[in-house]
Image: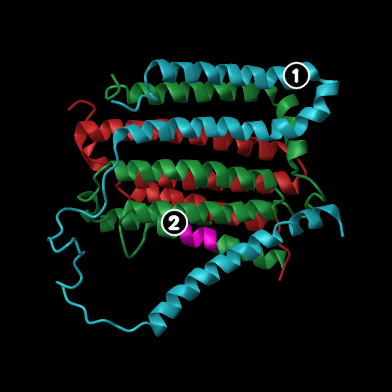
Chain colours: A cyan, B red, C green
Amino acid sequence: MDPSKSQLMQYVPVLMLAVVAVLFSAGTLAASSLLGKRARRSAVKDTAYECGMLPVGEGNTRLSIKFYLVAMLFILFDIEVVFLYPWAVNFKGMIREQPGLIFGSMAGFMVVLFIGYIYALKKGAFDWKQ
Amino acid sequence: MTPVGLQHYLVVSVLLFCLGLLGVLVRRNVLVIYMSLELMLNAANLALTAFSRFNNNLDGQIIVFFIITVAASEVAVGLALIVALYRRRHTTHVEDMTALKN
Amino acid sequence: MQACLFYLFAALTLLCGVLVIANPFTRNPVTSAMFLVLTIVSLAGLFVLLHAFFLAAVQILVYAGAVMVLFLFVIMLLDLKEEERRKIKAGAGVLGLAAAGGIALLMIAVIRQSNAGVGLKPASAEGSTLDLGKRLFTDYALPFELISLVLLVAMIGTVLLSKKDLK
């Protein structure tokens, strides 16, 4: 078997997991609709039960604004971490031949992003009190 | 069944791109338009990866990597703009955002 | 086997893509976002079939993991109840379908006629993270450094745009 085929074969368990996940969720839904008993339904019966009170307002809550700035900064630092994976894989091989390049490129990358981190910190982007 | 070649991947990429285009043209919610833009970017990524594989050249994959990075930063800034616009106008409907000033 | 998987993932990608832009059952943006996640995951499947293993992982990590979470955050942040009731205009729908369909047919015809990829055999073993990283940190070292500036600008822009509620 050639190496590219065997590399692809490593993903067969992932595929099997996906198939099992889909079958399990579809099977659960199908079984509950096939085996479960139908209850009588009416408009009153379908309202949410709130300890006897009538439910007020929408079911979905709106999130606070401070979560979203953290989420956005998370994406940008997530990208930074993603760039670290190929760097870490290559580090051992390249440190002997081109130590300046492999070290300097990532150092420059990190310094620029660290400036951004300091900026966000100074602006109070991670301040949860407000 | 013919073996899957470059053209198969390119056709999928074209169809996905045109779905994204259709979404941008037809939908009026600015968030869904943004998702359609993501579809178009992903179509470009698929085409580049397919070219990279069938031409035995890794440059395509590296460009896809950069595209994913730029797309993520674009999403962060774009969604910040959408939220800022929503606070001012209280809408995400593009037809209500025609004027530059209030 | 690989051909079957290609058709499965391609069909799943396109089906979920259709459901992102025009779901016949609901106009809720949350549903669109969930189907966009499915589109992205099946695209990652196509990347695996193209032996771009690292890109498949990045696709799921960055797109499905981070970008879509941000989309859902913003959808939850905004009050979109009133938006759902607006209809797609029939005229715009027909014209948009005609335009996008025309472009699709044109591009597919061009691909068919250009004989792109005829006679090209896929590479035997490549797309490993090692080779990708080696290219990234030697030939593409300058774009890599510039990408950090893009990220810095995005970071500053994000903080500035939402500064009003911080200070």
Chain to which mark 2 belongs:
C
- Please give the count of numbered marks on the rendered protein: 2
Horizontal side, residue C94 vs residue A9: left or right = left
Chain designation of label 1: A
Q: Residue furthest left?
A: A54
x and y, in percent, of residue B3 in the image: 73, 64
The front one of A114 and C41 is A114
Q: Position of residue A59 (x, y in %)?
A: 24, 55
Q: Quadrant of residue C90?
A: bottom left
Q: Is residue C14 magenta?
A: yes
User: Amino acid under label 1?
Assistant: Leu
Could you tell me which secondary element the residue under label 1 belongs to?
A: helix
For mark 1, what is the residue? Answer: A101
Q: Is residue A49 magenta?
A: no
Residue labelled with disc 2: C35
Q: What's the residue type where badge 2 is placed?
A: Phe
- Residue pictured at 69% horizontal, 55% vertical: C49
Examine the rendering and report whether any part of residue C107 can be seen: no
Q: Is residue C149 visible?
A: yes
Residue in front for this viewpoint, C99 or B25: B25
Q: Position of residue C99 (x, y in %)?
A: 41, 52
Q: Residue A111: where, in percent of width, then height?
A: 59, 16
Q: Which residues are magenta?
A: C12-17
The 10 Å Cα crowd at callout 2, few under 14, some 14 to 19, many 20 or more, is many
Task: Judge left or right: residue B21 versus residue C9.
Answer: left
| Depicted C153 relative to depicted A2: above or below | above
In space, the residues marked 1 and 2 are separated at their CA atoms by 42 Å
